[in-house]
Amino acid sequence: MDMNSSFVRRSTNQIACDMGGEVVILDLKSGTYYGLDVVAARVWSLIEQPLPFSAICDTIMSEYEVDAETCGRDVSSFLDQMKAVGLVEISNEAVC
Amino acid sequence: MQECVRPTMPLIRPGVPGAQTSPSARRTPSEFALLLLCARLRTDAFAKTQIEALLQEHIDWDSLITAAHKHRVLPLVYLTLRGMAGIPDVAMSRLRNAVQANVRRNLFLTSELLRVIELFRKNGIPSIPYKGPAVASLVYGDVSLRQFADLDVIVPSNSVVLAKALLVERGYRAEKPLSDDELAAFVATEKDITLLHDSLGINLEIHWGVVSDSDPIHVDPAFLWENLRTHTIAGRPVQTLRLEDLLLILCIHGAKHRWERLVWLCDVAEIVRTPGWVDWNVVLRNARRLGSGRILFLGLALASDLLGAELPPIVLRAIAADSVLNALVTQVKGWLLSEQTVPLDLGERERYFMRLREHSADRLRLAIKQAKSYLALTVRDSEALSLPGFLEWSRYVVRPIRLAGQYGITPFIRFFKGIFQS
């Protein structure tokens, strides 16, 4: 799947909280807790509703000093790992 | 359940390792003053200046953290102090660890609450999550920002037996073992039952009312179901009390527990602080309807006095017009500022409860209820005096005399002062 044309959203198998920018996610299936750093937390906040991958990268680049290639690589890597543990859903359509 | 934070992802960091500080010492006014300034979702410039001044003084951090935990305000204290200068690393680390543990516990409890609500919904039981995650999410905007220890769910009284059975199937056990018939009878006289999940370590209370017969005020359970709102907790829609009703119920709950925990006042203060959130006309109309005006104003006056919540003029005028309220505020502040829970002398609780009611008819009703409770005969009354059957009635005369002999007449004086000095 081409990540650039994909839509990303949070999976329903989790609940998360945001304590002043410190995001913690509980995976409801495995009972595992995940903590996100500031940038990852920002990505997480963006995908409450389905959002194109390109829009996520655009927002991150507008808020942080990072070039497009590094941003795309890091965000893609983060989302791939989140998908692997079932915390995000990535699809070609807006409704995941 | 695993409790770990995985550090494997490039943007994901592990939790901070734990740290210990020295054994606790006695809390001083500086620590409590700091606690009051920090126990807010947002601190204004004035509060921030006061905090910075206090941080220049010697702060007993063990004492502060212990008090923050006791008053269930650790997340607010942590958020306020995070990033400020003058806090020892070891104290901040201890605070952070405690808050991170609370975050994980809150998420876990919230996930269980949502499962229980879904279980009830599938079985046709409407439910209202009450206190805990619901108040954290509704009032603070996130379940991580308020400490809570257990779960509370309101269901209609005619659904309690089924709700309990469903929870027992889910692995819970009733704290008081009751048959279905006994439970149905229990529902008629009480307001909640506690269920325990031993392996998950969860206490869950099923409520069908929010006050018991011994409380200072009666709230018809129908009131709770009148104006529900849909709120989203962790992405799932749930039914919650309308904010105006919640404010009133929180004030009743805090008052009956003598406002022993600061977090209850924080709930009130945060509701008040959000501009345009509360329709005060609705709040005051409901308070009049329940006869709980003084109880409401006590909570609001304390939230203003201790936590800087700005009250609207309509409330300030009502507070100023109540001649008893000042003394009540002073009394409750005395309890709240004490390091330990203050035990009340016999009759003092009854007096306090009566003073919470603004109408003499309500005080009289409460006094009769309390008097009936005190005059109910016990085994000791039978043991104290052997009487022939036709004189059994005289035990009701002898009991107050026996109690006066045992405890003196001071509790009786307090009781009557409660009726007539309010």
Image (cartoon, coloured by chain):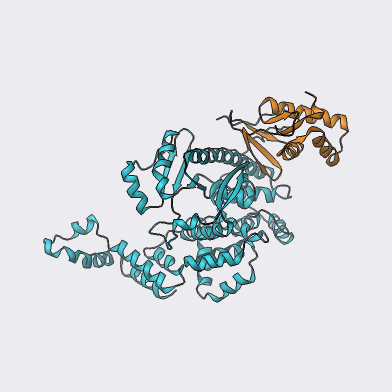
Q: Residue at x 58, y 30 (%)?
A: A31
Quick one: B95 or A2, which is closer to the camera? A2
Q: Nearer the viewer, residue B383 or B273?
A: B273
Q: Which chain is orange?
A: A
Question: Residue B349: image x %, image y %?
Answer: 41, 63
Q: The N terminus of chain B appears in which quarter of the rendering?
A: top right
Q: Where is residue B92 in the image (x, y as percent from the top left)?
A: 67, 44
In the image, taking residue B79 as reference, residue B229 lies left or right, namely left
Quarter assignment of residue B389: bottom left
Q: Which residue is drawn at 38% across and 66% down?
A: B366
Residue B208's place in the image compared with B314, above or below, is: above
Q: Is residue B316 visible?
A: yes
Quarter where residue B3 is shown: top right
Quarter of the figure that contains the C terminus of chain B? bottom left
Residue lying at the far top of the rendered structure: A1
Q: State the cyan chain.
A: B
Q: How many marks?
A: 0
Q: Which of B26 and A87 is in front in this view?
A: A87
The residue located at (75%, 29%) in the rendering is A78
Q: Which residue is drawn at 30% across and 67% down?
A: B408
